[in-house]
Amino acid sequence: MTDNKRSSFTGQIGFVLAAAGSAVGLGNIWRFPYLAAKDNGGLFILLYIILAVTFGFALLTTEIAIGRKTKQSPLTAYGKINKKFKGIGTLATLVPVLILPYYCTIGGWVLKYFVDFATGKGFDAAADGYFTGYITQQIQPIIFMLIFLGITAFIIYCGVNKGIEKLSKILMPILLVLILGISIYSLTLNYTDEAGITRTGLDGLKIYLVPDFKNITLKTFFVTLMDAMGQLFFSISVSMGIMIAYGSYVGDKTNLMKSIKQIEIFDTIVALLAGLMIVPAVFVFMGKDGMSAGPGLMFVSLPKVFSNMGTAGNVIGFAFFLMVIFAAITSSISVMEAIVSSIMDRYGFSRKKSATIVLLYTIVVGIIVCLGYNVFYFEITLPNGSVAQILDILDYISNNIFMPLVALLTCVLIGWVAKPKTVIEEATKNGEKFSRKGTYIAMVKFIIPALILILLFQAVGLLKL
């Protein structure tokens, strides 16, 4: 596929909204609030913001610059920078290959809950065992997964301009309005439990934002730091080939530094609002015990919260799951695009042929993931100590092993082999100012590799926190 035939975003706004759409996904909606509640609220948020403007900025800038400089997808872009490092491209492409099937499975769960609330059956979802009862079914989860995948594939078939960019321009503003509206409503809530204790949304806001420094030890600080860093991988879509693919569609005249700052700001605001939307509401009706990790927060705790809201609960639940669907779709199209663009660049296939290949693969593996809770059910203990099924294994390999490895090897390539000037020159080719140049060089050469090695040691069980 030649460069002059390559699609591109029509402008800076389209690129920023598409990249922000990729970043604002399921990880932001349920993972950020859970970690904020678990890790002493304000401390986690403070560390996250510091990491976003240093660690996140460096990785985001690097990947977008590599994409625009090479005009290639992740599979082939690294080899254009240095032939000896083309293997990073294979590793980076494997990440979305592993993520897409299980992401569409979870997207199907969200779709199911949206249909429940849209048809007035939302309160059924608040019943104990509802979520487990649903995912252990053999047929219905597959149907919803296929519908979600079909929507994702259709957008990819439409291309960069008429598909990804057009959808992002429509969905992202709506998503932001929904999150803002639900966040404000969450702060107005109050509830008196059976013990006569009244909790308000503002009480939950305090827990969310104000750190309790009295209970902070060196160990809790370090755990919070690692959690915040791990969340950044989810949050800004780095180390999974997406930003390289999107960067390759950015025009040479686009102000890269301005775009990256806008993506940072948009993603951070949405992450903070996601916490503001969820933490106070869950605290009001369920106390601190209501916060739980993983799918439990979105699919178990929140339906109970909506149920406790009375008549308004079904409306708020409908708006919430509509917003989550938008967030999930803008992310799933970016994951699929990273794979499709790689096939197009590597083998010269058309977009439709490449998308069809990815679609068929995802159907097969997605069905296996769905059946992992019934027909193919098993339990295995991972090196980090967590108990896993098929979905969890794919998530662990992609997020805990491959993504940190991609980030580490990318830092070696740019920090020590091709040198930081490769990225800096690309980012400032139109005379833009690289305002965090010193920070960028220090992060890429020293700080990020050191932090990622700790994260990797923790993931494989060599470091216990």
Image (cartoon, grey):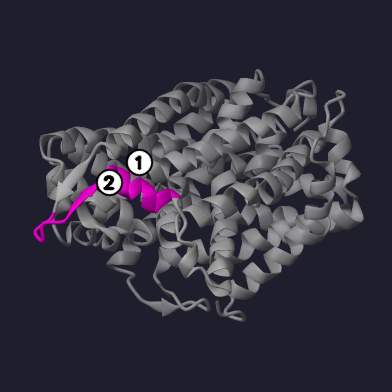
Q: Is residue 57 above or below residue 460?
A: above
**Which residue corresponds to the image point at 73% horizontal and 44% vertical from the top-left?**
63
**67 relative to 204, above or below:** above
Which dot marks residue 281? 2
Location of the N terminus by quadrant is: top right
Q: Residues within 10 Å of mark 1 (few under 14, many from 20)?
A: many
Q: Residue furthest front?
A: 214
Q: Which mark is residue 21?
A: none
Closer to the camera in the image, 425 or 340: 425
Q: Is residue 110 left or right of residue 166?
A: left
The answer to whether any part of residue 112 appears in the image is: no
Helix, strand or loop under label 2: helix
Residue extent of the magenta highlight: 193-209
Residue topped by disc 1: 277
Residue at position x 75%, y 57% in the image: 88
In the rendered structure, are the residues bearing label 1 and label 2 in contact, judged by CB atoms less than 8 Å apart? yes
Q: In front: 49, or 130? A: 49
Question: On the rendered structure, is 168 left or right of 254?
Answer: left
Q: Tell me the quarter of the image containing the C terminus.
A: bottom right
